[in-house]
Amino acid sequence: MSEEVVAEVAGKAGRITLNRPRALNALSLAMIRELTATLRAWRDDPGVEVVTIRGTGKEGPFGAFCAGGDIRFFHAAGLSGDPQLEDFFTEEYTLNHLVHRYPKPYVAFMDGIVMGGGMGISQGARCRIVTERTKMAMPETNIGLFPDVGGGHFLSRCPGRLGEYLALTGEVIGAADAVDARLADLVLPSSELPALWERLSLEGEAAVPTPHRVEGSQLADHRLEIDRVFALDTVQDIVRELEAGPGDWSRHTAAVLRKRSPLMLHVVLEQVRRARGMNLADDLRMERDLVHHCFHLRPGAASETVEGIRALAVDKDHAPRWNPARIEDVTPEAVAAFFRSPWSPQAHPLRDLD
């Protein structure tokens, strides 16, 4: 194991700590490989009754779970044509599938930042714990990407049209909203996490908490409007309705969407709606097609994703030059191209997922 993934068996628990705090535990290809190898080994180890996973913050364990994939690597690899970019997504999505299908209880301590790839290694957990410090999002439309790592699967299964809302806007939600959206199972004070971490080692599966509902969801305050507006047929319809809305929430949400990649908003709406009728493996295969196209339909600096990462994390000018620049200018043909697989079923890199 590298220092970025600390894995140990303690009592009845296999314990994983993501240990890349300066990068908010963003996943590298090496980390993905270590996580996969560890989970496969523990799957067949009779001494491991339960698996627990947490992140390390700047002040020690907990405090930050995982901010996603290593987007700086995506940017550099997208510009240089590095073949490891393809390996990254194939192996990450295989890991996501492994977590969802894991035969032993898997408990995710989703404290602090939980975004993108962090959702991919936690949404399949038997027990998903959030705290008062949790900041959860699938913010990929902000960098010209889409909510991958199984995002089509778990977002499309949120109540009502919360999936479309969270996927398109990339808005950050807290603990009560995460439970309300069925993206978490229970809220614990962050001060109680260390004791539960130890108790799971001592008691194993018997100590896995049971889900419970909580009060205080802000999403619930807007559910009627979310379900009405985000059920509309197209991105143009959604934005037009929001911009015509009377309240601050409608105007804020429309302004957020106007900042996102117009092209990827259209792709994401189609992704979530297709995924609603797919199983996990088929969704991950679709997402593998989509992410390939994000870097290859328009390669190098012309990629919407490369440009989005440049603006956010490389040059940090926060002024992405989206192409096309307006939601109204995205053509159906441009969207359809993302959903044509570059591989035959027999040659697909995720063909072995069940």
Image: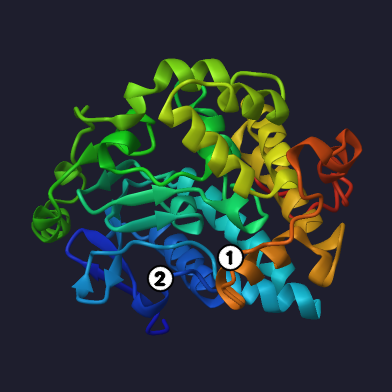
In the rendered view, does 171 fall on the left or right side of 207? right
Q: Residue at x 27, y 56 (%)?
A: 111
Quarter of the image with the N terminus in it: bottom left
Report the Cα–Cα distance between label 1 and label 2.
Answer: 23 Å
Q: Amino acid at mark 1?
A: His
Q: Which residue is mark 1?
A: 318
- Left or right: residue 179 compared with residue 32: left
What residue lies at 40% left-to-right and 63% top-to-bottom? 66
Residue assigned mark 2: 25
In the visual, does 291 lie left or right of 126? right
Label 2: few (<14), some or many (≥20) within 10 Å? many
Residue 19: percent from left, percent from top: 34, 76
Q: Position of residue 307 (x, y in %)?
A: 71, 66
| Residue 183 in the image, given as x and y percentages of width and height | 39, 37
Q: How many marks?
A: 2
- Image quarter (top left, top right, bottom left or bottom right) of the C terminus: top right
Q: Quadrant of residue 210?
A: top left
Locate residue 195: give its quadrant: bottom left
| Disc 1 element | loop
Q: Nearer the viewer, residue 123 or 268?
A: 268
- In depth, the one of 93 and 267 nearer the eye is 267
| Amino acid at dot 2 | Asn
Q: Residue at x 87, y 34 (%)?
A: 332
First in residue order: circle 1 vs circle 2: 2
Q: Quick one: label 1, few (<14), some, or many (20+) residues within 10 Å?
A: some
Residue 251's place in the image compared with 41, above or below, is above
Pick the front one: 172 or 336: 172
Q: Position of residue 311 (x, y in %)?
A: 63, 68
